[in-house]
Amino acid sequence: MNQIHPIDVILHKRDGAALSDEEIQGFVRAIVERTGERQLVTDAQIAAFLMAVFLKGLDARELATLTAAMRFSGDTFDASSLKTFTIDKHSTGGVGDKTSLLIAPILAAAGIATPTSEEVPGICVPMISGRSLGHTGGTLDKLETIPGFNTQLGLAQLAEVLRRCGAALIGQTPRIVPADRTLYALRDHTGTVESPFLITASIMSKKLAESLNALVLDVKVGSGAFMPSYEQSRFLAELMVQTGERAGTRTVALLTNMEQPLGRFSGNWVEVWECVDIMKQVRHPMSADLIELSNLLSGSMLHLAGRAKTPEEGAGLADEILTSGAAYRAWLGIVEAQGGDLSVFEDPASHHRPQASTVIKASRPGYLASMDCKQVGWAVQRLGAGRAKPGDPVSAHAGIESHAKLGQRVEEGQALFTLFSEDESLLEEPRKMLLDTLVISEKPVNAPPLLREVVSAAGHESIS
Amino acid sequence: MNQIHPIDVILHKRDGAALSDEEIQGFVRAIVERTGERQLVTDAQIAAFLMAVFLKGLDARELATLTAAMRFSGDTFDASSLKTFTIDKHSTGGVGDKTSLLIAPILAAAGIATPTSEEVPGICVPMISGRSLGHTGGTLDKLETIPGFNTQLGLAQLAEVLRRCGAALIGQTPRIVPADRTLYALRDHTGTVESPFLITASIMSKKLAESLNALVLDVKVGSGAFMPSYEQSRFLAELMVQTGERAGTRTVALLTNMEQPLGRFSGNWVEVWECVDIMKQVRHPMSADLIELSNLLSGSMLHLAGRAKTPEEGAGLADEILTSGAAYRAWLGIVEAQGGDLSVFEDPASHHRPQASTVIKASRPGYLASMDCKQVGWAVQRLGAGRAKPGDPVSAHAGIESHAKLGQRVEEGQALFTLFSEDESLLEEPRKMLLDTLVISEKPVNAPPLLREVVSAAGHESIS
C-alpha cells in the first residue's frame, strides 16, 4: 500500500480533481489512526479538506468510497447470523417527528407475524438513533424518559434484543464510525456542516454500518427542514439513495413536508405518550399526520422487506398492525428487553409533569396559514426539551402541544399551542418566538400534503 | 465594537460574500490574541478560512483590509523621524538572486550623495529580508556568512543603522506581523500556499509594516518562479501593486525572467563574493544579467525617490554609483554598522572553502537552450546551501557556479556548471538533477529578455 500524504489529498480536491479510492481511504485512515503523538493528519488539514470538499463536491464514486471508508473505520453491526431481512429508517430531523417509536414496533410485529422461512425471512430493525440538537428532536432523549430504558447497548446486546424482539432502539457507540465523530466535530465549528456530500457520508456511513439489506430515508422539506430549499433536499435524497445502492443496500427516500410540528406533541415524554396512545387505539385528531407518515414509511419498508406488493399496500398493512394492537405488544416487548418500566404506559398522561405552562391563542379569526417550523423547533429547545450544544441536559417534561394544524379554521381566542416547561421563566421567550411566526389569514388556505416525492434507484416519483 | 464570531466569517467567505472590514479585522485580531487557554479561533477554523479564501478569492477592498489588519497585528517600523524617503525592494524569490546586496548600498550611496533638503529628502532603505526556503535562496543566509554580521537587530537598532548608513539589511522580528507567522505556518501544511490573495497579504503586510513611501517589487516569471504561469505572476503583481497603492505606498512591479540562475554564483558566501567583486569593479561576464537587473530595480527606486526623471535615467545613475565605487563604500559602512568583519572582502575567493566539487560538462556541441530553473534551485538546496523546511541549517560554502547562459554557444566537454558542497556524498543527486534538466539544441536559440513587463498604478507597460 502506498503512503498517502494528507497534503496531496487536500491539494487534489482543492484543484477540483476526483480523488482516487486510495487517497480517500488513506485520508480517513489517517484520521482514525492518529493519536496525541502521531498526528498523521492535523485538525487544520482535516478542516482544509472539508472546506475543499464543501466547495468542490464529490462525484458518485468518491462519495461512495468516502462513505465506505468511514463505515469501516470502526466496529460494524452485522445481523446476518439472524438470517433476517435487516432494514432501518432514517430521518434528516424534524419537530415532533416521533415516527421511529411507531415504525420499530410495526416492523417488529410484521416480522414476528410472518414466521421465518426460506422465501420470506424475518425482519430485523437495528435502529441506531441520535439525540436532539438545535431545532430538531432526538429519539434517544425521548426514549430515556421511560424509567430504566437503556439506549446504550453494546453490539452483542443489540443482537440479543433483535433476536428476541425483531427491533431495538439504541444509541451510537463510540466504536461505530469513529471517523464521523472527528469529522462531525470539526464540521460543526469550521462552517462545513451544510454540504450535501458531507451530510450523505456522515448519515450513510452510520446507517450502512448496520449492514442493512434496505433503508428508507425520510428527507424533510419545508421551513422545518435542515436543507434550505426543496431542490437541495432532493439533491441530498438523490446522493443518499445513490450511495446506499452503490453499497448494495436497497435505498428509497421519501421527501416529506416539515412545515409544522408532526402530530400532537413536540418534546420528550409527551412524544412517547402520544405514540403509546396511538398504539393503544387512542387516536387524537392532532396525531393524524403522524400516523399517516408512520404508515407511509412503514409501508415502504414492508414493501422492500417483501411483505407487501406495493408501498401503498405496505402502508395499509402498517395501519392494520397499529390498530390490531400488534404494534403495541411489540413495543412492550422491546421496552422490556431494553430494561424499561412498562407501568408508565398504563396512564401516560399522569407522567407528564411540567411545572409551568402557557397557552397561545388565536389573535383573530381566520385560517392557520403558515409558521416557520424551524422557529417552532427552537422554541421547543428553549423550553428545555432540546439542546443548543452536544452534552447539554434536556428536560423530560418540556415541550409544546399543537391544538390546530395548517389550513384549519380558528376562532379568535381559540388555543393554538400549549407550552410546557419545568421552569416558568423559560416560557416567555418561546411564547414570543411562536407568536412572531404564526400567520392567520382571512381566506381559506390549503393544508400542505405530507408526501411530496419518492426518490429511488428507479428515479423520481412526484406525488404533489 | 461588535463581537466577530470566526464561524460567521468562514460561512460568509465560503458562500462567496465580500467580508466587511470589521469581520476581517476581528478574524485577524482573534488569531493574534489567542493563547493556550483562550482559543478565540482554532487552527481548524483558520484553515477552513484559508481554504475558503483560496477558492473564493478577495476583492480589492477585502485584500487591502486583510493586509492592513496583518500589518498592524504587531510592531511596525516608522522611519518618519529620519525625515527621509523610505523605500524598499522585494523579490518573490529566485535562484542566485542577490540583487538586495547591490541595491541596498546603491540606494544608500544615492541618499548620502544628495544631502537632505526640503525638496529632496534623503533615502532610507529598511530592508527586512527572509531566509532560504525550498528552491529559493534567502538574503539573510547569504549575509550571515560574513563573520560577525548581525541580522537580528531590534527596531531601535535598525533606526540607528539607517540614520548612519541610509540602508540596513535585517531579518524579520517575531513582533513584526505576528499574524503572518500563524497564517503562514498553517498555509504551509493545509495546501493554501499558492493563493495570489494570501501571498499578497503575507508579503505586503510585512513590507508595509516598514511604513514605506515607495516599494519596488521584482515578480519572477519563468521556470524558476514561484507562480506556475506568466498570467498568474502578472495577476500577483497587479494585486500587490493595487494593495500597496491603497495603503498610500507608491508601488511598482517589474516582471522579470527567472529561466536560469541569476549571475555567476548561486549559494551563500559565493553570492556575497560575486557582489563584492562587482562593487570592486571586478565584472565577471557571468554577472552581466545580475548587474542589469540590479540597475533596473535600483533605477525604478531612484525614479520613485525623485533622484531620476525616468526609471531608465535611474538605472544609468545606479550603474554610475556602482562603477564609481560609491556603492562599495556604502556597503562597507552598512556591514561595519551591523558588526560584520570587513577583512573577508579583501580576497573573497579565498573564503570560499567547499570540501568537494564536480563539474558538469556539455555532452555535445550546440546552444544552451533551456533548463528547469526551479530544478536548479532544488539542486542548490540539496548541495546544502538551502533548506527543505524552516529551521534547517545551511552551508556557507555549498552552491553552484554557472559557466554558460541560455542562448550561448557551447562545445562538447565545455564546463556548464561547477557544483560545490561541504560533503562529497551530497554532489551526486544535484548532479543528476542538473543533467536531467539541461537542454542543448543544434539550432541557435534566443536568450530570454530579463525585463518582461512593468506593472504600476498607471497600468501595464509591456517590454518584450
Image (tube, coloured by chain):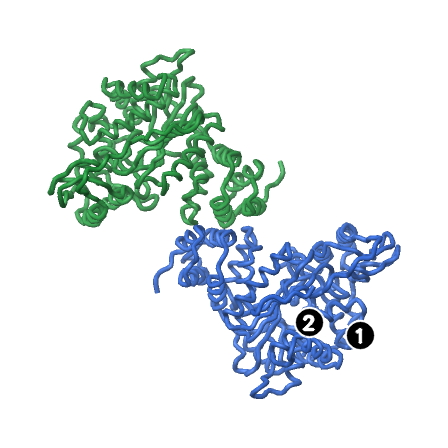
Chain colours: A blue, B green
Q: Secondary structure at mark 1?
A: loop
| Residues beneath discs 1 and 2 located on the same chain | yes
Chain under callout 1? A
- Quick check: marks 1 and 2 in contact, CB under 8 Å? no
**Nearest the eye: B132 or A18:** A18
Q: Which image quadrant is residue A184 in?
A: bottom right
Residue type pointed to by label 2: Leu
In the rendered image, the quadrant that contains the N terminus of chain B is top right
Residue at (51% x, 51% y) in the render = A55
Query: Dot 2 corresponds to which residue?
Result: A296
- What separation in Å lies between label 1 and label 2 (alpha carbons)? 20 Å
Residue type pointed to by label 1: Val
Viewed as shown, does residue A278 lie left or right of B275? right
Q: Where is residue B150 drawn, in percent x and y?
A: 31, 31
Instruction: Name the mark on residue B230.
Output: none
Q: Where is residue A378 drawn, in percent x and y?
A: 70, 55
Query: Dot 1 corresponds to which residue?
Result: A282
- Near mark 1 (Cα within 10 A), the count class, few <14, some 14-19 or many ≥20, is few
**Nearest the eye: B205 or B192:** B192
Q: Secondary structure at mark 2?
A: helix
Q: Is residue A34 visible?
A: no
In the rendered image, the quadrant that contains the C terminus of chain B is top left
Viewed as shown, does residue A321 lie left or right of B318? right
- Near mark 2 (Cα within 10 A), the count class, few <14, some 14-19 or many ≥20, is many
Q: Where is residue A262 drawn, in percent x and y?
A: 73, 64
Q: Is residue A240 visible?
A: yes
Residue at (45% x, 42% y) in the render = B183
Chain under callout 2? A
